[in-house]
Amino acid sequence: MNPKIWFITGISRGLGLGLARAVLARGDVVVGTTRDGSSPGGIDSTRLSVLQLEMTDREQIEQTVAAAHRRHGRLDVVVNNAGYGLLGSIEEAKPQDVDHLFAVNFFAPLGVIQASLPLLRAQRHGHIVNISSIAGFAPAAGAGLYGASKFALDGLSQSLAQEVAPLGLRVTVVEPGAFRTDFLSAHSLRRTPGDIEDYQASSGRSVDGLLSRAGQQLGDPDRAALAIIEAVDADEPPLHLLLGSDALRRARVRLDQFEADLRHWEDVSRRTDFASETGAGSAR
Ligand SMILES: NC(=O)c1ccc[n+]([C@@H]2O[C@H](COP(=O)([O-])OP(=O)(O)OC[C@H]3O[C@@H](n4cnc5c(N)ncnc54)[C@H](OP(=O)(O)O)[C@@H]3O)[C@@H](O)[C@H]2O)c1
């Protein structure tokens, strides 16, 4: 189908802006959202419309998705991009900061998905793209709550993919490594206090390491955009799309550790089935 109609949250800057630009450059149509409804600078296209959306406003999410659909009569690709990071030890995180993080990174994408699904089901086609993070698969110390919000999005996406595949709908979770956007800047990132000395060697060190790479991240947002477009165009799009050699490396380490746990504890895992099911008699 050409041109595709894309709905993308958070196109004011970063990966969302890069994706909007790349999608427009190839002739597709974008309905993007920004917090104040203004168009991001530097884009001059009649194929772009911008709607106002604060991701924590659940009611507004429904209205915005409906308005985006009304504008062109269909939505082909729905991208949950808007999000941010919260860094610091898990113990020190403030409940209100955790609530806000999950509101933006998980409940808002859930709202967008639930608002979109009736429309996509009626079309019998559509692709939901959820921007998670490599922290949603292989989180480091200091990124536990951010990782948890992205794990939640990943878990939901895996189940959703199975629920909607028979209806002709597709789901892709994107897991970027470190990309050179505002993500690590004070404009975007939130931090927990970091006052507890005991965590300096774990989360403190890990967060310092991350922040020291601000402005030098390996990932190019424009290349990320092209990779996402390639996945959306594919006859068989991936359920998971990792972006960046750093993300690949972290995922492989995580998979190896997971596999090692499975192997090492396999006998114990098997022993918990009812004895009558395994034929193991009185084995414990
Ligand atoms: N860059 C990375 O290294 C990296 C790695 C893994 C995953 N990611 C994910 O990629 C996505 C995009 O991040 P980015 O790197 O492009 O960061 P960014 O440059 O900080 O951009 C974040 C975008 O999300 C929007 N946003 C944040 N909170 C919002 C809210 N409450 N309501 C509406 N919009 C909101 C921002 O809007 P405003 O301009 O109004 O704040 C902005 O458009 C996020 O989901 C992030 O978790 C990024």
Image (cartoon, rainbow, N blue to C red):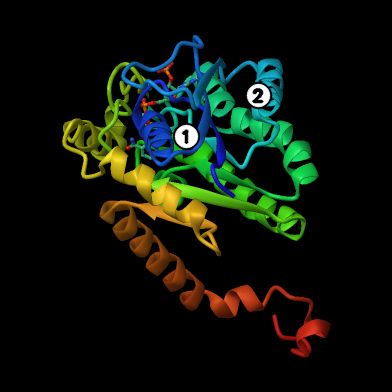
On the image, the x and y values in percent for residue 88 come to 36, 29
Q: Amino acid at mark 2?
A: Arg
SS type, badge 2: helix
Query: Left or right: where does residue 124 sit relative to residue 76?
Result: right
- Count of numbered circles on the image: 2
Q: Is residue 258 visible?
A: yes
Crowding at dot 1, Cα within 10 Å, few <14 / some 14-19 / many 20+, comes out as many
Q: Nearer the viewer, residue 209 or 34?
A: 34
Between 70 and 58, which is closer to the camera in this rendering? 70
| Relative side of 42 to 61, left or right | left
The residue under the point 27% across, 34% down is 207
Give the amino acid type for the residue marked by disc 1 in the picture.
Answer: Leu
Question: In the rendered image, which residue does mark 2 sit on?
Answer: 71
Q: Are marks 2 and 1 in contact (CB under 8 Å)?
A: no
Which circle, 2 or 1, is nearer the viewer?
A: 2
Local SS, label 1: helix
Residue 14 appears left or right of 122: left
Residue at 71% x, 85% y: name it: 283
Q: Earlier in the sequence, mark 2 or mark 1?
A: 2
Ligand 1 image-quadrant field: top left
Indicate if the residue with disc 1 has its beta carbon within 8 Å of ligand 1.
no
Q: Residue at x 73, y 53 (%)?
A: 164
Give the quadrant of residue 25.
top left
Q: Quadrant of residue 21?
A: top left
Name the residue at the right extreme.
Answer: 276
Where residue 145 is drawn, which disc sits there?
1
